[in-house]
C-alpha cells in the first residue's frame, strides 16, 4: 500500500488535473409497473459508457422510477438502480447513475 502511494506521489499524475471522462447514457425498455392518477412506476434498462484515459468502461443496470404527482407537480419519489454483473467496487459512480 505504501509503495503504491509513493509511486503515485512521485509519478507526477494528479487526479484533479486529469481530463474529465466523457459519458454516454442510453435508457430503453420502458415497462409500466403501476399507473394511477397519483403515482407512476416504470421499469427500464440503462447502459452507461464512460471513456477516460483511452479506455471504455461499461455499466449496465435495471432501473425502477417511481414518480408521484402532487399539487406542486411531479416529484421523483424513488429511483432504484440494480447494476448487472457488478462485483467490484464502483468508486465515485453514484452521481452518474
Image (cartoon, rainbow, N blue to C red):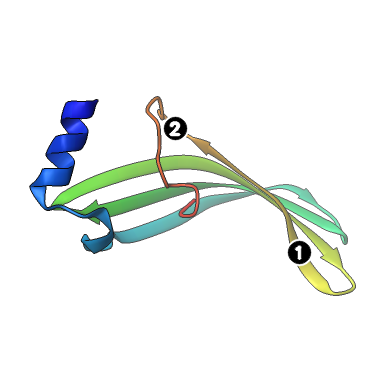
Is 10 drawn above or below residue 77 in the view shown? above
Q: Secondary structure at mark 2?
A: loop
Give the mark nearest the N terminus, 1 or 2: 1
Nearer the observer, 5 or 15? 5
Is 35 drawn above or below residue 83 in the view shown? below
Q: CA distance from mark 1 to mark 2?
A: 27 Å
Q: Is residue 20 left or right of residue 46?
A: left
Which residue: 76% across, 64% down? 75
**Neighbourhood count class around disc 2 (C-alpha, 10 Å): few under 14, some 14–19, many 20 upward:** few
Which residue: 53% across, 40% down? 62
Give the quadrant of the N terminus.
top left
Residue denoted by label 1: 75
Percent x, y for residue 31?
Answer: 62, 48
Residue denoted by label 2: 84
Percent x, y for residue 76?
Answer: 72, 59
Is 3 drawn above or below residue 61 in the view shown? above
Q: Secondary structure at mark 1?
A: strand
Which residue: 31% across, 43% down? 58
Amino acid at each position: 500500500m505504501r509503495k503504491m502511494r509513493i509511486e503515485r506521489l512521485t509519478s507526477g499524475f494528479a487526479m484533479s488535473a486529469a481530463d474529465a471522462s466523457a459519458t454516454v447514457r442510453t435508457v430503453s425498455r420502458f415497462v409500466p409497473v403501476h399507473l394511477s392518477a397519483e403515482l407512476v412506476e416504470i421499469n427500464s434498462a440503462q447502459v452507461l459508457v464512460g471513456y477516460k484515459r483511452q479506455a471504455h468502461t461499461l455499466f449496465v443496470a435495471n432501473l425502477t422510477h417511481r414518480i408521484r404527482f402532487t399539487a406542486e407537480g411531479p416529484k421523483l419519489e424513488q429511483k432504484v438502480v440494480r447494476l448487472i454483473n457488478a462485483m467490484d467496487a464502483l468508486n465515485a459512480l453514484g452521481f452518474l447513475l
